[in-house]
C-alpha cells in the first residue's frame, strides 16, 4: 500500500502531501494520525522553517472519511469527543508557518484543515465547501471561528447554510485565499513564498505569527496591549549588532526587488 502521507524536505522547507487520491484524500484514521505525527516532528526539526500542506491531485481534502465513520470503523466511536473538539483537527499546535497549497476541492473537514493554516494559496481548480449542515454534524475544528475571520460572518453563514461550493476566484475576492495561480504553478509559487519566509529570522516570524493568532481573538485594546508586551519581550533579547546585520540584508534585498 502507498504511504497515505508524503513528506519532502529541502532548503529549510517541508512539503507535506496527503496521498489518498482515489478517496479525494479523505481523512481516515491512518491519515489523521500520520498528519499529527509528521507535523509534530517537522515542527521540532531545527532544519525546517516553513511547512507547506497540499493534497495529491485531483483534490486537496474531501474531509473526514465518511465511509470509514459510517461503517463503524476507527473514528468517532474510537476517539470519542476529543476527535471532534480537538483544536485544529489532526494538526498539532505548530510554532512554524504552515501554508495551504489548495490544489482541488477542500470540503468540510478539509476546508477546516486549510483554514487552520496561516494562509492559503489556491490553484485555479480549487473549490471550497462547508457541508456540515448537509451531513448533520457540527464543525469542531474551528470553522465557526476562522471562516468569519476570513470572509465575514454573513458570507460564512451563506456558505455553511447552503453547503454550496465556492470557486477559487470568488474565494480570492472574498479574502478566503491570498492568491490564485495556474494549477501547474501552485507548488512552485507557494514554495517561492515559503523561501521568502525561510529567509527571515525564524524566531521572529514565529513570534509575529503567534501575536497575530492571539490578537485575533481579543478586543482591539487587548490586542494593542498584547503587541506591546510581545514587542518588549522580543527587544529585550535582541542585540544591536544583530539588528544592524539584518538591516544591511534587508537593504540589499530591497534593492534587488526594485
Image (cartoon, helix red, strand yellow):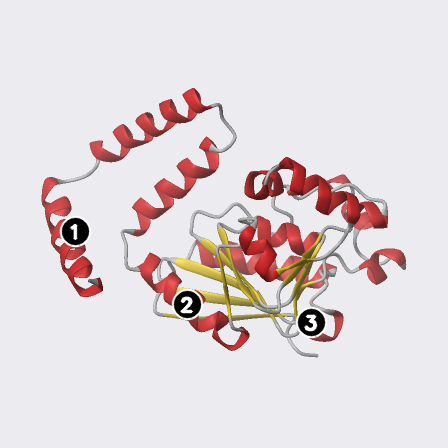
Residue 251 in percent (x, y) is at: 14, 55
Q: Which mark is residue 191?
A: 2
Residue 123 in percent (x, y) is at: 55, 67
Q: Is residue 76 left or right of residue 170?
A: right
Tell me the residue at 19%/58% (across/down).
254
Secondary structure under tag 3 reads loop
Which residue has dot 1 on it? 246
Do residues under tags 3 and 2 come within 8 Å of each other at their CB atoms? no
User: Which image quadrant is residue 18 in?
Assistant: bottom right
Q: Is residue 121 left or right of residue 58?
A: left
Tell me the residue at 14%/60% (across/down).
252
Secondary structure under tag 2 reads helix
- The Cα–Cα distance between marks 1 and 3, rounded to whole angstroms, is 43 Å
Quadrant of the image for the N terminus? bottom right
Determine if residue 71 is in view: yes
Considering only order in the chain, which callout, 1 or 2, is on the residue closer to the N terminus?
2
Considering only order in the chain, which callout, 2 or 3, is on the residue closer to the N terminus?
3
Compared to residue 191, the image places residue 172 above or below, namely above
Compared to residue 182, the image places residue 112 above or below, namely above
Total of numbered circles in the picture? Answer: 3
Determine if residue 72 is in view: no
Which residue has dot 3 on it? 20
Tell me the residue at 49%/26% (across/down).
218
Q: Is residue 251 left or right of residue 45?
A: left
**Foreground mark, 1 or 3?**
1
Residue 210 in percent (x, y) is at: 42, 39
- The Cα–Cα distance between marks 3 and 2, rounded to whole angstroms, is 22 Å
- The Cα–Cα distance between marks 2 and 1, rounded to whole angstroms, is 23 Å
Amino acid at each position: 500500500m502507498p504511504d497515505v502521507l508524503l513528506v519532502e524536505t529541502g532548503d529549510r522547507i517541508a512539503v507535506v502531501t496527503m496521498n489518498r487520491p482515489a478517496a479525494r484524500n479523505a481523512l481516515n484514521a491512518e491519515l489523521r494520525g500520520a498528519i499529527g505525527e509528521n507535523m509534530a516532528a517537522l515542527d521540532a526539526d531545527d532544519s525546517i522553517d516553513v511547512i507547506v500542506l497540499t493534497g495529491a491531485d485531483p483534490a486537496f481534502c474531501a474531509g473526514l472519511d465518511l465511509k470509514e465513520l459510517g461503517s463503524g470503523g476507527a473514528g468517532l466511536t474510537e476517539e470519542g469527543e476529543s476527535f471532534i473538539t480537538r483544536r485544529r483537527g489532526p494538526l498539532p499546535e505548530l510554532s512554524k508557518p504552515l501554508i495551504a497549497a489548495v490544489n482541488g476541492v477542500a470540503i468540510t473537514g478539509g476546508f477546516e484543515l486549510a483554514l487552520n493554516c496561516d494562509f492559503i494559496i489556491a490553484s485555479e481548480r480549487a473549490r471550497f465547501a462547508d457541508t456540515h449542515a448537509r451531513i448533520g454534524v457540527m464543525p469542531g475544528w474551528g470553522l465557526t471561528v476562522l471562516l468569519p475571520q476570513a470572509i465575514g460572518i454573513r458570507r460564512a453563514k451563506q456558505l455553511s447554510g447552503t453547503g454550496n461550493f465556492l470557486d477559487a476566484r470568488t474565494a480570492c475576492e472574498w479574502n478566503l485565499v491570498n492568491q490564485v495561480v495556474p494549477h501547474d504553478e501552485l507548488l512552485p509559487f507557494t514554495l517561492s513564498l515559503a523561501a521568502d519566509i525561510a529567509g527571515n529570522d525564524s524566531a521572529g516570524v514565529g513570534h509575529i505569527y503567534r501575536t497575530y493568532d492571539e490578537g485575533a481573538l481579543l478586543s482591539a485594546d487587548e490586542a494593542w496591549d498584547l503587541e506591546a508586551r510581545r514587542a518588549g519581550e522580543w527587544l529585550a533579547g535582541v542585540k544591536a549588532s544583530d539588528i544592524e546585520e539584518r538591516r544591511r540584508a534587508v537593504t540589499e534585498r530591497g534593492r534587488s526587488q526594485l
